[in-house]
């Protein structure tokens, strides 16, 4: 398949130096601002997030291009669903904000958490449906049974990721997914610094979810035509609900920006930025390991066919 100019630009943006301080200074995100020496505006924080490597990660384009095997798809969904599940829990975070006198921010976070409840079953249904479509036979027989689908996804994850360093056989989490999940465990803490870090993490999460993860899933699952699915079928409800101008993620992004904008000042910015960076660093590592699984699937399929590397 020919590589588009857009894909080439995205590949270029994945190089590590793209996130180096010198590049970020050029992009208008001075490292000195991140160190709390100068007041940071919400616009600059958003800009900081948007120049991160997560925003140019090639994983979804690679998925669409490589047409991965059903086993790999199931393994990737397992990592994704456990990560997404960890981001839906509010734990003590909304209450901790209220305890700090940030009741408006606490209310906004509660609204985000409430709107995410019960999304696990919709995600499992979409995952099972895509795995079945990819295999052209029924691998997940009852996609309405969340627990049954998740059990199957884990089994496939065990076979794909079992030899990756740090893989946990009990949970089926890669080391990278575990670190990404651990960032959201911080919501169980209610001290001041953890709470401001949680605000930063939420801002980065909602921007990435709305602008990268959900549109990326639409690209590889729907727009690619690999699975013959459309947004309006009931099995794809998860994507329909989250995607687009009136989707849940658009609302979450607006609420997260509003919450951080009104809590941002010289005494809180260092912790907010730390929370942003912890999330972005952990997520990009998770996307990298998932991207490697796609590459392995593509190489296997490629070398089993009559392509040049099999000759
Ligand atoms: Fe969200």
Image: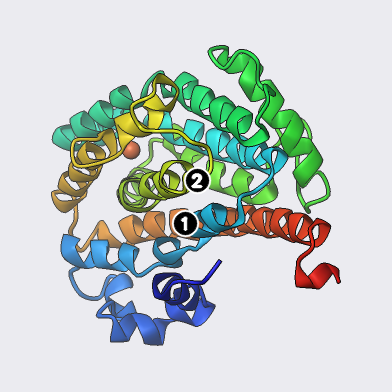
Compute the Cα span from label 2 to label 1.
Answer: 7 Å
- Picture layout, residue 213 above or below residue 116: below
Query: What is the number of the mark on residue 217?
Result: none
Q: Position of residue 127 (x, y in %)?
A: 55, 30
Q: Mark 2, residues whose alpha carbon is within 10 Å: few (<14), some, or many (≥20)? A: many
Name the quarter where the C terminus is drawn: bottom right
Mark 2 vs 1: CB contact within 8 A: yes
Q: Is residue 159 visible?
A: yes
- Circle 2 sits on which residue? 183
Residue 148 drawn above or below residue 23: above
In the depicted structure, whether residue 36 falls above or below residue 250: below
Classify the position of ligand 1 by quadrant: top left, top right, bottom left or bottom right. top left
Out of 62 and 67, give the one closest to the viewer: 67
Name the residue nearer the viewer: 119 or 201.
119
Which residue is found at the position 53% from the left and 44% from the top? 226
- Residue receiving disc 1: 278
* Image-quadrant location for residue 28: bottom left
Q: How crowded is mark 1: few (under 14 residues within 10 Å), some or many (20 or more)?
A: some
Q: Can residue 91 be seen in this view?
A: no
In the drawing, does residue 296 fall left or right of residue 127?
Answer: right
């Amino acid at each position: 398949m020919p590589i588009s100019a857009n894909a080439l630009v995205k590949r270029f943006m994945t190089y590590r130096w793209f996130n180096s301080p010198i590049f970020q200074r050029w992009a208008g995100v001075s490292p000195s601002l991140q160190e709390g020496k100068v007041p940071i505006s919400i616009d600059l924080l958003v800009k900081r997030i948007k120049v991160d490597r997560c925003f140019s990660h090639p994983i979804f384009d690679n998925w669409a291009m490589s047409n991965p095997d059903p086993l790999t798809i199931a393994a990737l969904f397992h990592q994704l669903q456990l990560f997404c599940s960890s981001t839906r829990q509010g734990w003590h975070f909304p209450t901790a904000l209220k305890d700090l006198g940030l009741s408006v921010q606490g209310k906004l976070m509660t609204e985000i958490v409430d709107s995410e409840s019960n999304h696990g079953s919709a995600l499992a249904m979409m995952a099972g449906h895509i795995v079945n479509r990819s295999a052209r036979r029924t691998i997940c027989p009852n996609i309405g049974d969340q627990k049954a689908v998740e059990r199957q996804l884990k089994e496939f994850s065990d076979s794909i990721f079992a030899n990756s360093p740090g893989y946990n056989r009990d949970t089926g989490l890669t080391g990278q997914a575990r670190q990404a999940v651990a960032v959201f465990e911080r919501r169980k803490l209610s001290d001041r610094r953890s709470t401001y870090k949680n605000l930063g993490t939420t801002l980065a999460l909602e921007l990435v979810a709305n602008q990268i993860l959900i549109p990326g899933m639409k690209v590889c699952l729907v727009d690619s035509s690999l699975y013959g699915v459309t947004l309006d079928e009931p099995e794809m409800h998860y994507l329909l609900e989250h995607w687009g101008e009136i989707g849940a993620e658009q609302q979450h992004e607006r609420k997260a920006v509003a919450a951080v904008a009104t809590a941002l000042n010289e005494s809180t910015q260092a912790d907010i930025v730390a929370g942003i960076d912890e999330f972005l660093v952990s997520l990009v590592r998770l996307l990298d390991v998932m991207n490697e699984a796609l590459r392995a699937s593509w190489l296997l399929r490629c070398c089993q066919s009559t392509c040049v590397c099999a000759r």
